[in-house]
Image: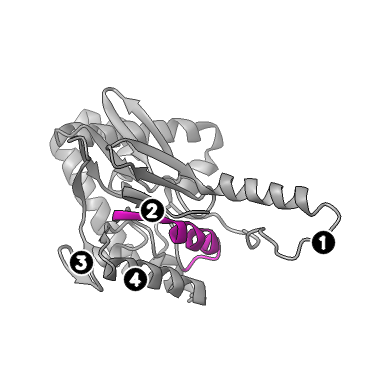
Amino acid sequence: MDTKHYRTLFISDVHLGSKAAKVDFLLEFLRVHEAETIILVGDIVDGWRLKRSWYWPQDCNDVVQKLLRKARKGTRIVYIPGNHDEFLRGFPGSHFGGIEVAERMIHETADGKRYLVLHGDEFDVVVRNARLLAYLGDWAYDTAIVINIGLAAIRRRLGMPYWSFSAWAKLQVKQAVNFIGEFQKVVAEEARRNHVDGVICGHIHHAVMEDIDGIHYINTGDWVESCTAIVEHHDGHFELISWGERIGAVKRDLKAISRDVPLAISMEPAEVTTTEAA
Ligand SMILES: [Mn+2]
């Protein structure tokens, strides 16, 4: 596959350090996708998982090295921490190996539209307590978000697991779709408060591009299950890439070709036993 060039590339929720991370797929993806700017939209490293038990095979280093090499060659890379890599939240504005750390940012597209970029976990508390906060008003809303981030830091220090949006949503299967919808609405509302055209976030592992009450809501998805990324083309339009499906297509092709020949290379990802994340 030829290398593709984009203006901006957005990925999130890789969860390096978790056995469920599809690191080999991501490496292949990064090999054939170049961009002027790469924005890492949080939960790239799973600090919560690593704290419980260290799991860092060589291919995790390969991802880090690949990104650092791109930075050296002139790609601007911005790392927006999520809840699983919130240890980086203590370093806004700092650089490591040419990678900038920012809590959130405004991204301006080639055609002049402005997008708020953030991970999205700060709104968990709002999604869970939507009715109560609507009743209590703006002050409670802002305070709840600040408390949510503070609590996550304290829980991590105490070695407690982070409250997981997707695990929680999955437990309440019937309502999961409602929760995703509620999250999207809350994040779109935050974009409106910031007077921007759209928002780009991650966190809930549900890649999508859609209009929510006049706000362009974009979610980058994840590299634990779906292997998705968002790219901005040179003219400013966005595209959702489902690399998992592409890989699936390759696998089907290989099977068709080698119907009579045993498949030498298995494209199957390692057994996924846990999908706890978000
Ligand atoms: Mn997250």
Q: Is mark 2 within 8 Å of ligand 1?
A: yes
The CA span between labels 1 and 2 is 35 Å
Answer whether residue 156 is visible to the viewer in this image. Answer: yes
Mark 3 highlights which residue?
Answer: 90
Mark 4 highlights which residue?
Answer: 69
Seen from the viewer's position, the closer of residues 4 and 266 is 4
Foreground disc of the pair 3, 4: 4
* Farthest residue, direction front: 2
In the picture, measured across the screen, residue 68 lies left or right of residue 15, that is: left
Where residue 37 appears, as percent x and y from the top left, is: 27, 54
Mark carried by residue 246: none
In the picture, measured across the screen, residue 270 lies left or right of residue 127, that is: right
Q: Is mark 1 within 8 Å of ligand 1?
A: no
User: What kind of residue is marked 3?
Assistant: Gly
The CA span between labels 3 and 4 is 25 Å
Q: Residue at 31%, 35% (x, y): give it.
A: 237
How many C-alpha atoms fall within 10 Å of the one at disc 3: few (<14), some, or many (≥20)? few
First reached walking from the N terminus: tag 1 or tag 2: 2
The CA span between labels 3 and 2 is 19 Å
How many C-alpha atoms fall within 10 Å of the one at disc 4: few (<14), some, or many (≥20)? some
Q: Secondary structure at mark 4?
A: helix
Q: Is mark 3 within 8 Å of ligand 1?
A: no
Mark 1 highlights which residue?
Answer: 262
> From the viewer's perspective, is residue 5 above or below residue 66?
above
Foreground disc of the pair 2, 4: 4
First reached walking from the N terminus: tag 2 or tag 4: 2
Foreground disc of the pair 1, 2: 1
